[in-house]
Image (spheres, rainbow, N blue to C red):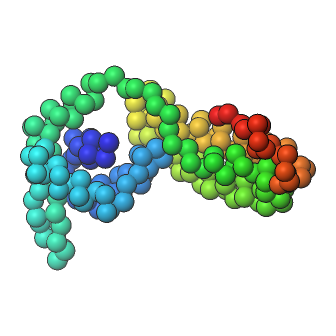
Amino acid sequence: MLEYIILGFLMGCAASGYDLKQYMAESTSYFFDASYGSIYPALKRLEEKKLILSEEKVTGGKFKKLYSITEEGRGVFLSWLKQPVRFAKTRLDYLVPFFFYEYLDPITAKQNLELFIETASVGLEELKAQKEELNIRNMDAGHTFHGSVLVYGIRYYEMLIEWCSQLATEKSTTTANTQKGGPLSENNHPRL
């Protein structure tokens, strides 16, 4: 997936590895992110496949390696892009601890949920700011594909914050259930 994201960004303009990381941080990191340790090997693979080219430049006394997409790279990217999108269960690892919060004392559970809400709220505000920026540039964020993904992200974060808030309120009065016979005892295994 990372290689296609890189090709997608390079469809717009040439970029350095640093630039690509920044583009991801500002956009795709809400649903797919990568470290520099993943980006640079992916750039090397793409260059070996002749899907991108690199050019070394010195600007302002600094060395910069810019990558641009080749015609073959454009073809590969567009061919991938034309494929129907398949739904897949996403990795929502953060739900695992919540699933077992029955065993945590209510005060700690509530505090952890509130911290999670704070983190999600920061992401929500960043997405709203990006949507506003698109609107300012006379691109109605609800009517572009980029904007539609932002709207999806905003609604997702809003749902997540509402869900966590409700969970924190409802579960803050319950007691931890750590004794034998609790919700996960012998024949009482939960099903996802």
Query: 147 or 121, which is in the foreground?
Result: 121
Q: Is residue 18 above or below residue 185?
A: below
Outermost residue, front side: 186
Residue 156 appears left or right of 7: right
User: What's the residue at 59%, 37% (across, down)?
Assistant: 156
Residue 174 appears left or right of 64: right
User: What's the residue at 13%, 70% (across, down)?
Assistant: 58
Q: Is residue 126 above or below residue 146?
A: below
Q: Position of residue 57 (x, y in %)?
A: 11, 66
User: What's the residue at 72%, 38% (across, down)?
Assistant: 189
Residue 117 appears left or right of 138: right
Location of residue 40 (image quadrant): bottom left
Outermost residue, bottom side: 61
User: What's the residue at 83%, 46% (across, down)?
Assistant: 182
Residue 140 appears left or right of 55: right
Q: Is residue 81 above or below residue 96?
A: above
The total of numbered circles placed on residues is 0
The quadrant of the image that shows the N terminus is top left
The quadrant of the image that shows the C terminus is top right
Q: Position of residue 36 (x, y in %)?
A: 32, 62
Outermost residue, top side: 84
Q: Is residue 133 visible?
A: no
Q: Is residue 163 visible?
A: yes
Location of residue 162 (image quadrant): top right
Query: 90 or 5, which is in the foreground?
Result: 90
Query: 48 or 67, which is in the foreground?
Result: 48
Q: Position of residue 53 (x, y in %)?
A: 10, 51
Q: Position of residue 62 (x, y in %)?
A: 19, 74
